[in-house]
Each structure stands twice: as structure tokens, then as C-alpha cells.
Image (cartoon, rainbow, N blue to C red):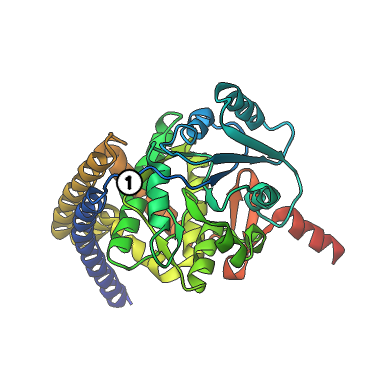
Amino acid sequence: MIHFLHLIGAALGWLAIVVAACGVVYSTAAALVFRRYFAAATPAPIRHQAVTLVKPLYGAEPRLYENLASFLVLEHAGPVQLLCGIQRRDDPAIAVVEALRADYPDAQIDLVIDGTVHGASGKLSNLINMEPLIRHDVVVLSDSDIAVAPDYLSQILRALDQPKTGIVTCVYAGRGDTGFWSRFGAAGVSYQFMLGLVFGVANKLAAPCMGSTIAMTRDTLHRIGGFARFADKLADDYAMGEAVRALGLEIALPPMLVDHAFDERSLPALWRHELRWGATVRDVAFWPYVGIIIGLPLPVAILSALYWPTVGLILCALAVVARLVVVRNVDATVGRRIAPLWMALAHDGMSFAIYIASFFVRSVDWRGATLTMKTEGRIVAAHKIQNAEQRA
């Protein structure tokens, strides 16, 4: 028995060595691909199309005013409607929208306050309530924690005009707004998740659709069933992308970056946020998610050192060097320092823990609500489960 356990341990050790070594090569290659992908960006001409910018809001995030204001100073010559949706009349985001109306009197800023529920997802209920107020034929949906550059719409519209393009989405870089833990989260999304996503797109291994931007025509939105079709989807952005792909259209990812604001003030809050992300990706793309482990060479190298110390320690050193290459290339591409190297390395450890935990999660926290994950990416709110149990 002891001999058998020794063989199992040795096999796991060698597996960790192989995964860590592949991870070092992958991380270095992905960093170079990331920088090259965005180096291909070119200026886009100012456009004249009428556009509706759809913003589902919930609460007053630390820099919500600045995030929304970035959509009001775009280099765009056509009509722009900023359509904001809120579900509660006591939501502090209302004051932010009113402040924007006062500071940008010439902007078309519409506000929908409607608490009607259309399924388990509060965000989708918000979108469904806003949909009848969309004025223009180009619809650009983005989360409230996104901030953009002035050429945002020019780049989006140029990509949307390409033949066979049905949706345009955007890569985002993390921005910590509330101190250490928010910056810690920004390091993870920038130096790991987005890195892998761009590598997948550049090599035609992935076709993501993300809440950072979902741009499509109103006709395409109608053809996929409107927002109501996704009322019980946790990964609603991914589901919209898949619905558009089912029409024979493609998802475009232009070489531009937007900012994604993190506002977590504690480790538990960040843990819940990233665990929800992990469990969501696991459900919509299980085998690619399994392969994400290759993007965590340092934690795996540390594990390999438990079995083969010399080889493992060499791999640890190489993993640190690879992460340094990642940090420098991503920061150079973004144009600012997102986080120091040590924070990126420390986040790798948390990412490894999240990765393991995500395989055992069947419910997630979303803005204080508990959502239970069902088959085919569906979710059910906890209060609905309780009501069903009471009726039974």
C-alpha cells in the first residue's frame, strides 16, 4: 500500500512539473500575443450613426459618476442616448444620474425606474424594463463599472460594420477603486483572465462575449429574442453571444481596451466575486475552464517542489520570471501600472484556491442575492426555491 501511494505521489509530482513547465511557456507566449494584439490598433473615423448606450445600474459605486461620464464625452458625431435603468426608487444611483443631467444638459440621458421582476437575474429584469425605451438602431450595452476612451464608439461601430459581425465585445483592464483588495482583484483579471482570453481569440480558440461591451443592432437583438430570452441565465453575456452565433453571425473583439472598476473592500467580498466568475465560466465552458490551470504556473510549480524539490524550485523561479514578462507587457499595453509583481504572484495563489473551490459550487452570490445554478446555465433565486418548497 505504501509503495502504491508513493507511485501515485510521484505521478502527481511529474504531472505538476509538466503543467508548470507548460504554464511557463504559455504565460510568456500569451504576454507577447497580448501586446501584439493591441499594437495592431489604428484610429477609427468619427461616425454619425444614432446609438443607444444601455446602462443597468444598481447602487452608487465609488466612481460611478466618472464611469458614466466617460460615455458622454465620446468622439461621435451622431445622436447618442444614454439609457439608464434602476429598479428601486431609493437607489443612490438615481442621484448620480441626476448629477449627470445637470452637468451635461445637452446630452440625451433617459432614466427608467421599474422594479418589475422577470426572472432570477436582477440585471436582466432591469434590461427588460429598459428595452421598450431604446430609441436607436445601434444598441451598446455595458456594465456600470466600465469606463471608456473617447474613441470607444468609433472603434465599436467600425467593428460592427464588418461583414458577418453580429456582436462586438471588448477586452477590459482592471482598475482598483477602493484600496488594496480592489487593486488585488484588478491584478488578477488583468494579468491572468484577460491575458488568456486574448490568447484564445488571437489563436481562434475562443469567441467570448462579455458585459464590458455588447454592441449589436436592434434588429439582431430582436432576432435573438430580446433581453427576455436571457432572464434566467447567470452568464447572460455569454448566452447572448451564443444566440448571435446561432444566427450565423460572428463576435468581434477589436484591439481596444476599456477599464473595469473593482470596488471590493475585503477579502471575503473579492472571494465571492471571483468565485462567481469561476463557477460561471465552469458551467458555460467546462473543458476550457479545466485548462485554465496552465495559466497558474507558480502555484503548480510549488506543488511540484513537494515531490521533486530541485526541479520544482527551478520551475518556481522560471514561473516568477514568466509572470514578470506578463506584468510588464500588460502594463505597457494598458499604459499604466495596474499592480506590482508581488501582487500578481500573490493573486495567483488565490486564483488557484478559487479554481479548486469552483468545481464544488452550486450557488453564487450576486449583489447580495443567492442564485442557485441549474442545468444549461440557468439560475434560480433563493426566494423562489423557498417558495417552491413551501408549496410542496
Q: Residues within 10 Å of mark 1 (few under 14, many from 20)?
A: some
Q: Residue at x 46, y 33 (%)?
A: 70
Where 41 sits versus 285, above or below? Answer: above
Q: Closest to the observer: 202 or 339? A: 202
Say above or below: 247 vs 73. Answer: below
* Whether residue 362 is visible: no
Q: Where is the N terminus found, in terms of image quarters?
A: bottom left
Residue 373 as seen in the image, left or right of residue 190:
right
Judged left or right of residue 188, residue 233 is right
Name the element at disc 1. Answer: loop
Identified at 22% across, 69% down, the residue is: 14
Q: Amino acid at mark 1?
A: Ala
Q: Residue at x 42, y 45 (%)?
A: 47
Residue found 38% across the figure and 55% down from its top: 159
Q: Is residue 58 visible?
A: yes
- Percent of width and height locating residue 22: 21, 64
- Name the quadrant containing residue 296: bottom left
Near-viewer residue (82 or 89)? 82
Rendered location of residue 121, percent (x, y): 65, 53
Q: Quadrant of residue 82?
A: top right
Q: Quadrant of the C terminus?
A: bottom right
Which residue position holds label 1? 44
- Residue 150 is situated, as x and y percent measured from the top left of the image, at 39, 36
The one nearer the camera, 263 or 261, is 261
Residue that extends furthest to the right in the rendered view of this protein: 391
- Disc tally is 1
Find residue 2 and report its horizontal and vertical position in percent.
30, 74
